[in-house]
Amino acid sequence: MSELRPETDEDWWEVEALYDLCFAPGREALSSYRLRDGVPPVRGLSLVARDDDGILAGAIRYWPVQVAGRRALLLGPVAVHPTRQGEGLGGWLIRESLVLAAAQGWDRVLLVGDEPYYGRFGFRRLTGIEMPPPTNPARVLGLELKPGAWDKITGKVERGA
Ligand SMILES: CC(C)(COP(=O)(O)OP(=O)(O)OC[C@H]1O[C@@H](n2cnc3c(N)ncnc32)[C@H](O)[C@@H]1OP(=O)(O)O)[C@@H](O)C(=O)NCCC(=O)NCCS
């Protein structure tokens, strides 16, 4: 069994090590990281999954961003340790954090990722939303936590406060 808890400062480097393990080298060169530079992740939504022995099995982080002056959540990175993948932990981290995000009053979420995976959580391709280049537009996906929250919103994604 694992449990989900909000990430704390003490978890930070362990989560970084998990991301280094799960993503290709140079992950911080990805354009989405330009939106994270110098901005802390959103407290209470960034979660860690640990097993009964306290071993880190998965983690998800969120950053605040702005699109056309409207605030949004940037989901990611999310990763599950290779020995624990396929058990539903990734889905649990995503679903649980999205419920918390709605409860915190967030209206909209975006991410850069695979639609075949994120589609199962309701994410759909966003048009007219520009991530820092180079980003494949087909991988820019959004989810509405309030109906219509992405309607008529277009423009560049910028760092949040
Ligand atoms: C993506 C990731 C977080 C999923 O975590 P997980 O705990 O294995 O996911 P779950 O157990 O909830 O779901 C597994 C399902 O997702 C599918 N899946 C995983 N990655 C996928 C992808 N990139 N595209 C399509 N489907 C994917 C699996 O095939 C499996 O499908 P099934 O339910 O039909 O069997 C994990 O595989 C991971 O850490 N990958 C490396 C880092 C990464 O790519 N993160 C996402 C960045 S966009």
Image (cartoon, rainbow, N blue to C red):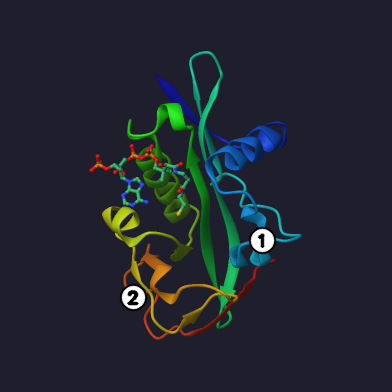
User: Mark 2 or mark 1: which comes first in sequence?
Assistant: 1
Q: Position of residue 86 (x, y in %)?
A: 33, 34
| Residue depth check, mark 2 versus mark 1: number of the one nearer the observer | 1
Query: Quarter holding the C terminus?
Result: bottom right
- On screen, residue 156 versus residue 160, left or right, reads left
Q: Nearer the viewer, residue 35 or 67?
A: 35
* Looking at the image, residue 98 lies above or below residue 152: above
Q: Residue at x 42, y 55 (%)?
A: 102
Q: Could you say which quadrant of the image residue 69 lies in?
A: bottom right
* Looking at the image, residue 60 lies above or below residue 112: above
Asked if residue 8 can be seen in this view, the reply is no
Secondary element under disc 1, as helix, strand or loop, is helix
Q: Residue furthest right?
A: 38
Residue at label 1? 29
User: Mark number for residue 57?
Assistant: none
* Looking at the image, residue 11 lies above or below residue 127: above
Real-space Cα separation, disc 2 to disc 1, in angstroms: 33 Å
- On screen, residue 37 versus residue 67, left or right, reads right
Q: Position of residue 78 (x, y in %)?
A: 49, 46
Query: Quarter holding the N terminus?
Result: top left
User: Mark number for residue 148?
Assistant: 2
Asked if residue 54 can be seen in this view, the reply is yes
